[in-house]
Image: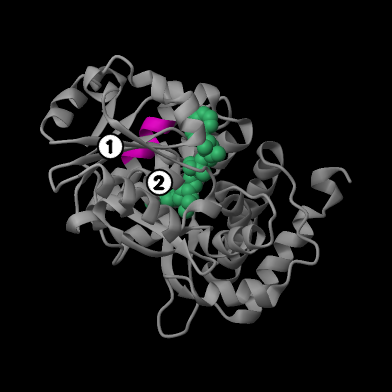
């Protein structure tokens, strides 16, 4: 269930149905977001668990810290964990709650654009492990997702752009309408994107089929994100996806007969909205090794989500290694192309 600002009073009933409530925050959401709940009396007296922000902390050590706080404060099976944060907090909080005493209820309160339209909805929870993204985790649904647009007021531009990339992704796999999204974001795009994510994930909770389309742009996007984070470079989840979509469109032309005009259109749209990344010298063998661990693979093949046209995604497309390398080189060349970046 998704609750918006007008439904916020329903939170009180949900909280009071539990023995204890714990609030998970990262250092930024404690500072910027917790205050929005001052009016909810039941939340004031509850235990806060504050973790460091950033993907590098989406680890088993942070989960252990959360579990130790739950144990120390006598959380029982009727306790509730409220995750207030971006995708990092909702992913790790959902995972910690779902394992604690074989599962306690949790509520997601996404505070980033990406969290609202993607991470907090659909029940994927997890952590990174041995340098691999979301390698450990489970499907587990939040009791409810609370969406408050006010949180976007303090969100840095780079984080807003990261969320925008995932909204634009829906333009390729679901409806061209989403390709019109830009910053400052119109809340209509957020509500419609949430409805899309909610609808798809309800129809295929454990990603046996249709849900896979949400991974458009993610195979190479995740590999770039993983490699750059491992090498202490700054990258946001959505930035990886935005770049991964350039490669996915290139492959869609080759494997699904996609019209090149669509790739050209996206390269213009990307250059208008997103920042250039310097990918020169990025090692293909390291990216390929990361992709071999992608959870969408089966039987050793690397599988992609590609599109035949706007709104016509195809999943489980086995792509040859040499074509994957070509598609990354295509992306690297694009990032160096003076026609787009004036350099
Ligand atoms: N479960 C899923 O289905 C799913 C889908 C997509 C992405 N994800 C995961 O989501 C994560 C990325 O999420 P994200 O982009 O939200 O990043 P994030 O949670 O790391 O948040 C980004 C930064 O913004 C700060 N922040 C959060 N809310 C703020 C606010 N309102 N004001 C100011 N600062 C704020 C955070 O402290 C952090 O520094 C990744 O781990 C990714 O794997 C999960």
- The circle on residue 8 is none
Estimate the x, y position of residue 95 in percent, counting from the top left.
Answer: 32, 54
Q: Residue furthest top?
A: 39
* Image quadrant containing the N terminus: top left
User: Residue at coordinates 43% horizontally, 25% vertically from top-left?
Assistant: 33
Q: Secondary structure at mark 2?
A: helix
SS at mark 1 in the image: strand
Mark 1 surroundings within 10 Å by alpha-carbon count, few (fewer than 14), some (14 through 19), many (20 or more): many
In the rendered structure, which segment of residues is drawn in magenta?
190-195
| Furthest residue in direction right, as rendered | 343
Residue at the far front: name it.
72
Q: Pointer 2: residues within 10 angstroms few (<14), some, or many (20+)? A: many
Q: Is residue 160 above or below residue 77?
A: above
Q: Tell me the residue that label 2 is attached to.
A: 119
Percent across and percent down for residue 117 are: 41, 39
Q: Who's the residue at 52% across and 77% down the image?
A: 292
Distance CA(mark 2)–CA(mark 1): 20 Å
Report the residue marked by disc 1.
22
Secondary structure mostly seen in magenta is helix
Q: Earlier in the sequence, mark 2 or mark 1?
A: 1
Q: Nearer the viewer, residue 56 or 173?
A: 56
The picture places residue 331, in percent across and down from the top left corner, at: 71, 60
57 lies above or below 164: below
Does residue 340 sit above or below 28 in this rendering?
Answer: below
Q: Are marks 2 and 1 in contact (CB under 8 Å)?
A: no
From where the camera sits, is residue 123 visible? no
Q: Is residue 230 left or right of residue 204?
A: right
Q: Is residue 44 left or right of residue 240?
A: left
């Amino acid at each position: 269930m998704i609750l918006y600002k007008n439904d916020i009073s329903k939170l009180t009933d949900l909280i009071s149905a539990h023995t204890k409530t714990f609030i998970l925050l990262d250092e930024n959401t404690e500072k910027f977001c917790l205050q929005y709940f001052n009016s909810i009396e039941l939340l004031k007296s509850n235990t806060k668990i504050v973790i460091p922000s950033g993907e590098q902390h989406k680890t088993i050590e942070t989960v252990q810290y959360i579990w130790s706080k739950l144990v120390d404060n006598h959380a029982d099976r009727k306790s509730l964990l409220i995750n207030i944060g971006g995708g990092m907090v909702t992913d790790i909080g959902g995972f910690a709650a779902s394992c604690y005493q074989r599962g306690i209820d949790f509520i997601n309160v996404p505070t980033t654009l990406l969290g609202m339209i993607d991470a907090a909805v659909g029940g994927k929870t997890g952590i990174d492990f041995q340098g691999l993204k979301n390698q450990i985790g489970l499907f587990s649904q939040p009791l409810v997702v609370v969406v408050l647009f006010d949180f976007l007021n303090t969100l840095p531009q780079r984080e807003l752009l990261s969320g925008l990339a995932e909204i634009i992704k829906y333009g390729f796999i679901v409806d061209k309408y989403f390709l019109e999204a830009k910053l400052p974001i119109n809340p209509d795009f957020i509500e419609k994107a949430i409805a899309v994510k909610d609808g798809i994930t309800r129809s295929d909770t454990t990603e046996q089929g249709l849900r896979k389309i949400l991974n458009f742009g993610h195979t190479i996007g995740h590999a770039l994100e993983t490699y750059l984070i491992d090498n202490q470079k700054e990258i946001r989840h959505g930035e990886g996806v935005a770049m991964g979509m350039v490669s996915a469109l290139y492959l869609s032309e080759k494997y699904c007969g996609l019209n090149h005009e669509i790739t050209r259109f996206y390269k213009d749209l990307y250059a208008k909205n997103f920042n250039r990344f310097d990918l020169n010298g990025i090692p293909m063998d390291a990216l390929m090794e990361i992709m071999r661990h992608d959870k969408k693979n089966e039987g050793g093949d690397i599988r992609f989500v590609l599109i035949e046209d706007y709104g016509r995604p195809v999943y489980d497309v086995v792509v040859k290694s040499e074509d994957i390398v070509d598609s990354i080189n295509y992306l690297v060349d694009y990032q160096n192309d003076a026609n787009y970046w004036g350099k």
